[in-house]
Amino acid sequence: MNTEFFGVISIFIVTIVLAIPVGRYIAKVYLGDKTMLDAIFNPIEKFIFKISGINSTEEMNWKQHLKALLSVNMVWFFLCFLVLISQGSLPLNPDGNPSMTPDLAFNTAISFVVNCNLQHYSGESGLSYLGQLMLMFLQFVSAGTGMAAAAMVFVAMRERTTDKLGNFYNFFIKSCTRILLPLSAIVAVVLVFSGTPMTFEGKDKIVTLQGDTVEVSRGPAAAFIGIKHIGTNGGGFFGANSAHPFENPTYFTNAVELWAQLIIPFAMIFALGFFLNKRKFSYVVFGVMTAGFLMLVIPTMVSEINGNPAIERMGITQATGALEGKELRFGTAVTSFWEIATTVISTGSVNGMHDSTMAASGAMQLLAMMVNAFYGGCGVGWLNFYIFVILAVFISGLMVGRTPEFLGKKIEAREVKIAAFIAILHPLLILAGTALASYFAANDTAMGYWFSGNATGWLNNPGHHGFSEMLYEYTSSAANNGSGFEGLGDNNPFWNISTGIVLLLSRFIPIIGPLAIAGLLANKKYIPESAGTLKTDTTIFGVMVFAVIAIIAALSFFPALALGPLAEYFTIK
């Protein structure tokens, strides 16, 4: 167990250390400074802009950024939807996998467009290789979209008074080519040399140790898995995700995949400091996020390492912790760390089954997604945290009796209303969806078209855990995470359509809000710093932001957590 702890701590520290130079590099990319990769990517980017007819030097205001962002995402959704509903009759389908139903294609297309990768299908049987490649493309562009939106907010925070906030397409293409592509290629190469398939051949046949002939799925998995983690996407090429030995062959690849999903969210915070030339502010932000992360990961690791008290009462030793749903290749400690990393980061990949974790661990996983502001996904992690910064500045201003200011701009009613709406939207979508599903299940409602049978049929677990499964599904959707308590029967019109709507609203409205706030603040007159200016790069301000996050999360979600994982915890304890 001490060796497992050493592995977890090493991965975490190495990621932080490497995130600083990566963050400096990201800042240079968005500032347009020279980098060592210019010779490779300048010709590629010029070619992309030439054939698309886009002027990458044209300055945009926040509304133009938003228009471009929403337009290209709409095109990608329809393109993906068409591929998925017709993949059975398209090329690159050596295993003869069928086309998706319209409701499943609707859910899957939205899920990958919004960087969630909620999967109501199993990759081996649910997708052709063409479908997998389509989704791999979306894993690049969805991550690039979030990073481009964050870059615009960086520019708005840096400039004194302007409505010229860079060019969305320039930020987007550079995010994909100069950041996501090189890093994901490194991870893919590591995976190939570790045994992950990278082929367009169909299923292979093997003879097992007991003499059975078994068909084994394969495909262009290594490339898919590289961007799956670097882009904080999380969708599995195979149904078991990173618990599958082809997706995650060894302890070393497990460490690499953990690093891969952490590196850009960490680096984006340091990039903020380099971009604004306010490194102390980025350290405060990173400190708040890390404090929140540790408060989630430590109880999870303790819970899983101590094992299941119900099994303990039977007199069965659990020296290696609660092993149900976990891979012995990795161990309890690092799997517990992954569980919180993937829910805090909003990656959603799994190397063990979350539905099998202890109740306290399930509560921490849910809380990580409910807060949705500690590190977060590519780019959108900062956007979510930015909302809480605005609210903290406003509340701090009220406490000291002066007009709130942030980086030389007054925070007024319009910005606060937008921030408050975004903060309230997240729990509204989660709790409303869960309430609707719980109502149907509690009344064993006949669902007709929406579900083949009565609503209780989608629950494999009754009581508190069944409620947790429904709560987790909507929380994962609203947090753009994609992991799940997989005891839930979710591949049906009710869950595909309802979570698809939540996915759509919870991705783009929380992007629209920060872009609008940043654009409005950028247009305001700059106020030079004075003795009365609120310092936002201090520990006190960091504590204030953390308190705002904790209060909003506690008030919004404690009742739901009390009905699900907390009630289950006290039941089995």
Image (spheres, rainbow, N blue to C red):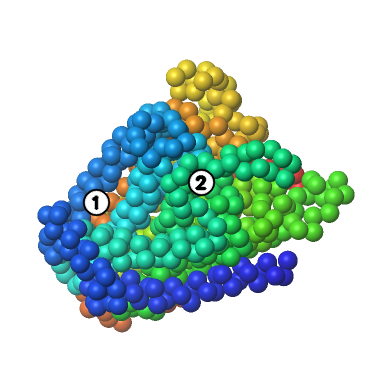
> In the rendered view, would you say 552 is above or below 287?
above
Q: Quadrant of the N terminus?
A: bottom right
Return the residue nearer the eye: 521 or 218.
218
Look at 55% across and 57% down and name the residue there: 195
Where in the figure is residue 440, as x and y percent of width and height? 52, 25
Give the structural element (helix, strand or loop) at label 2: loop
- Above or below residue 225? Residue 472 is above
Identify the residue at the far bottom of this view.
Answer: 531
Query: As shown in the figure, which amino acid type bears the numbered disc 2?
Result: Arg
Q: Which residue is mark 2?
A: 218
In the image: residue 327, left or right of residue 421: right
The percent position of residue 197, horizontal first and vertical second, equals: 50, 52
Task: Report whether 205 appears left or right of 47.
Answer: right
- Position of residue 174 measured from the top left corner of the image (x, y, whole percent): 27, 64
Q: Residue at x 66, y 47 (%)?
A: 325
Give yes or no for contact between labels 1 and 2 (Cβ–Cβ under 8 Å).
no
Report which quarter residue 103 is drawn in.
top left
In this image, 159 relative to 467: left or right? left
